[in-house]
Image: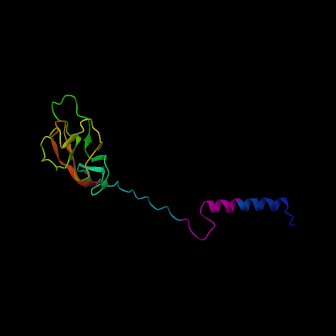
Amino acid sequence: MVRICDGQRWRMVATGLLVSSAVACGGGGDAPMPAEEPVEEVPAPVEDRSSMTPSVGFVSPTDGATVSSPVSMEFIVSNYNISPVPQEVETPRQGMGHHHVGIDTECLPVGEVVPQGDPWVHFGDGSKTFETMLEPGQHTLTLQLGDDEHRTQEGLCTSITITVE
């Protein structure tokens, strides 16, 4: 057992405080404290404008799929707004449209009005899903966007082929 008298205790406490403060301040060791590295500001990522082109597509079915009837369809659009057709249309709204599905037909020319009735189904209510009965065999499904006057829009048409069992 080691006996420490009051004077020695005081020196030990003082020495401990000096060592503690030296270590906390970066002293008392051979290795210098590492300097803080300057923080580099990372520039904001540049937005990829190539993906800003409007497009339409089928979420389901996928091109080449084999499905059973009734055939369920879900549509997707990018960089374009889908909206129900207003009750009264004086001028078509820019950048707004709705889906049309053509069964066993191809895309219509840009600016043409999508015909009412067979083979086209209109979704003037802004819907993005549809279910229909199709005969067994191969079918072409065409998804085409139209404006408030049902006029086709540039680049907003796609077709897929499916097989119904």
Q: Is residue 72 above or below residue 9?
A: above
Q: Residue at x 15, y 30 (%)?
A: 90
Measured as percent of width and height from the top left, residue 94 is found at 19, 39
Q: Is residue 107 above or below residue 29?
A: above
Colour scheme in use: rainbow
Measured as percent of width and height from the top left, residue 74 is found at 31, 46
Residue 143 vs residue 67, the one in the foreground? 67
- Quarter of the image for the C terminus: give it: bottom left
Measured as percent of width and height from the top left, residue 143 is found at 22, 47
Whether the magenta-drawn stretch holds residue 138 is answered as no
Q: Is residue 152 above or below residue 139?
A: above
Q: Residue at x 17, y 45 (%)?
A: 153
Q: Given the current orientation, which residue lies at the most extreme top position? A: 88
Q: Residue at x 61, y 65 (%)?
A: 27
- Quarter of the image for the N terminus: give it: bottom right
Residue 58 vs residue 39, the one in the foreground? 58
Stretch in magenta? 17-33
